[in-house]
Image (cartoon, helix red, strand yellow):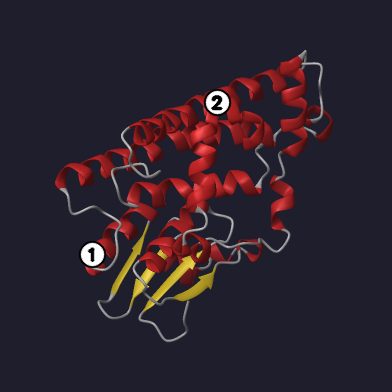
Amino acid sequence: MSNDSNLTLYWLKYSPYACRPSILLCEKQQKFNSHVVDFSVQENRSAEFLKISPKGKVPALIDSETGVTIYESYAILSYLEEKYGTVGPSFSENPKARAQALIRSSEIDNYFIPASHKYFGAWYVLTDEERSDESGENEKVKQTDVAYEQLISEFQKYDDVLKQQKERGQPLYLVGDEFSVADIMFLPLLLFFEHVKLDFSAESNRLGNVIEYLEGNKKRPSVRDGYPAFWNGDETKFDTSKYMQAYHKRKCQ
């Protein structure tokens, strides 16, 4: 990150969507100015920010060199790829691999993310007592369990993709032999779930390849530098560990 770049990225530290462009910029070794939008004081609703991102969402990017202002994570990735496409892997130059990366990216946003939202929406409205409920009789808890299983089903689709990669002797990426935009779309979501204490280790029998993929790729310099290692304590309000512990106890009954 830099204070003398023509690129300014507006983002939020615990937003996996906002971290996608920062990972790609690190992948392409491009300096950028970092502006963390303060949602606690509704900076995202300010007149100044709404001129940049009309829906008040992050990420958003200003490129003073070209005069471009752009928002939505995938749109930003596409713009950066067009501008810096010759620097580092992201969208593959191989047409077949590029098509697969684009398909995976669309599937992540169209299917995986809605399942994530459904689970977090169900979990968020649970009381602390309900999150710790081991009986399995509470209707809200049952609905959360269903949403969680649907999320795991989405995870398993990517576990199968990674299994096939291994069987072909290919590295643990979502597409082909290179780190691609599909990985940049997916990894921040896994890192987010790790931060909020979705217990991947308890799902090792169902998500073993996803776990291996996460552990290997989070050491990648662009991922390490592009995704914040800490949230300044903000993650506590998203801590799902009580529910996860109770869920696995219910499943063992």
- The residue located at (75%, 18%) in the rendering is 250
Task: Estimate how packed mark 2 is, as few (under 14), some (14 to 19) or many (20 or more) residues with alpha carbons within 10 Å.
Answer: some
Q: Which residue lies furthest to the bottom in this view?
A: 4
Between disc 2 and disc 1, the foreground one is: 2
Where does label 1 land, which residue? 85
Where does label 2 land, which residue? 206
Using residue 25 as the reference point, say whether residue 153 is left or right of it: right
Identity of the amino acid at label 1?
Gly
- The residue located at (72%, 25%) in the rendering is 247
Using residue 178 as the reference point, say whether residue 147 is left or right of it: right
On the image, the x and y values in percent for residue 110 come to 38, 35
Residue 57 in view: no
Secondary element under disc 2, as helix, strand or loop, is helix
| N-term-proximal mark, 2 vs 1 | 1
Q: Which residue lies furthest to the right in this view?
A: 129
Tag shown at residue 12: none
On the image, the x and y values in percent for residue 99 come to 21, 42
- The residue located at (58%, 61%) in the rendering is 13
Residue 69, quarter of the rendered image: bottom left
Secondary element under disc 1, as helix, strand or loop, is loop
- The residue located at (35%, 52%) in the rendering is 179
On the image, the x and y values in percent for residue 185 come to 40, 48
Residue 134 in view: yes
Identity of the amino acid at label 2?
Arg
